[in-house]
């Protein structure tokens, strides 16, 4: 990458931080079920944790977990460089790779970092979908590290949806947002077979899709928050 190209990506990262900070400062975020995360962190100081969701919600995840030293996998493509510069501005630690390119190397690096105590967030249908169908990477990471997975999901009462493969959500200014934690962890035994890992992956998909339906319908029945 030449200097001009790098400067463009670098400036994009700061612009993304500015726009996200201004936008989300106008929104009201209602968090449901965070007690499971708080109890885990209280009882396991210095230990990592894995978070899983769909790629459609990446915009808020970056802001919501800002400046906590979270690990995230970003693809080794030009689009991945844009994402890398953006998440770095929020204090995330990007690891470059995906299921289609440098995936094994990236997973190994993530494994090392979460065992050091970092938390990691994975949008598990990335980098190119299909939407709402996870890749096996997070299951393998949980198996190798012994760390639990906490599924999370969010939606907004008013938002734009990008015309891309995952229909990325961008809340409109002053939107109400609901952020949901699952009520239990998903764990993968160290001795899990390939077939058992696949069953865990399917279980994760079912959990995330159920949660997605809940948050997408939340503002149809919820009182004003």
Image (cartoon, rainbow, N blue to C red):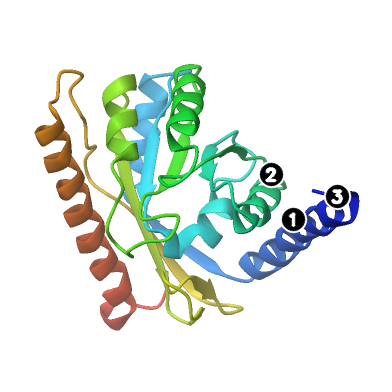
Q: Nearer the viewer, residue 198 or 178?
A: 198
Q: Mark 1: which secondary structure?
A: helix
Q: Quadrant of residue 140?
A: top left
Determine the CA span between mark 2 and mark 3: 20 Å
Q: Residue 172, image x and y in percent?
A: 57, 79
Q: Residues within 10 Å of mark 2 (few under 14, many from 20)?
A: many
Q: Residue at x 53, y 68 (%)?
A: 28
Residue closer to the observer: 2 or 68: 2
In the image, taking residue 18 as reference, residue 157 lies left or right, namely left
Residue 155 placement, left or right of 143: right
Q: Quadrant of the C terminus?
A: bottom left
Quadrant in the rendering for residue 186: top left
Q: Would you say 210 lies left or right of 131 here?
A: left
Percent coordinates x, y for residue 149 in the rendering: 30, 37
Q: Earlier in the sequence, mark 2 or mark 1?
A: 1
Task: State the mark number for residue 13.
Answer: 1
Q: Position of residue 130 (x, y in %)?
A: 32, 64
CA neighbours of label 1 inside 10 A, class few (<14), some (14 to 19), many (20+) = many
Snapshot quadrant of residue 210:
bottom left
Q: Which residue is mark 2?
A: 88
Residue at 41% across / 27% down in the picture?
A: 41
Which disc, if any, is residue 109? Answer: none
Q: Marks 1 and 3, Cα distance to the nearest angstrom?
A: 17 Å
Residue name at image x 31 percent, y 21 percent: 144
Q: Secondary structure at mark 3?
A: loop
- At 37% from the left edge and 61% from the top edge, which residue is drawn? 129
Q: Earlier in the sequence, mark 1 or mark 3?
A: 3
The residue that label 3 is drawn on is: 2
Look at the numbered discs 2 and 1 and tell me whether their residues touch, using CB distance below 8 Å.
yes
Marks 2 and 3 in Cβ contact (< 8 Å): no
């Amino acid at each position: 990458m030449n200097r001009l190209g790098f400067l463009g990506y670098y400036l994009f990262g700061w612009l993304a931080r500015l726009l996200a900070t201004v936008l989300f400062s106008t929104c009201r975020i209602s968090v449901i079920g965070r007690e499971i995360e708080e109890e885990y962190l209280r009882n396991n100081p210095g230990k990592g944790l894995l978070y899983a969701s769909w790629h459609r919600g990446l915009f808020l995840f970056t802001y919501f977990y800002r400046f906590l030293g979270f690990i995230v996998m970003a693809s080794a493509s030009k689009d991945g460089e844009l994402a890398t510069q953006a998440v770095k501005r929020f204090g995330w630690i990007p690891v470059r790779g995906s299921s289609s390119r440098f995936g094994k190397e990236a997973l190994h690096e993530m494994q090392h970092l979460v065992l050091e105590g970092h938390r990691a967030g994975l949008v598990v249908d990335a980098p190119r979908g299909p939407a709402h169908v996870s890749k096996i990477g997070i299951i393998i990471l949980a198996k190798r590290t012994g760390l639990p997975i906490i599924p999370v999901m969010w939606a907004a009462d008013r938002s734009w949806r990008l015309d891309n493969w995952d229909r990325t959500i961008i809340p409109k200014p002053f939107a109400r947002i609901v952020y949901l934690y699952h009520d239990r962890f998903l764990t993968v035994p160290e001795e899990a077979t390939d077939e058992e890992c696949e069953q865990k992956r399917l279980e994760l998909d079912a959990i995330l899709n159920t949660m997605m339906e809940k948050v997408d319908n939340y503002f149809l029945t919820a009182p004003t928050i």
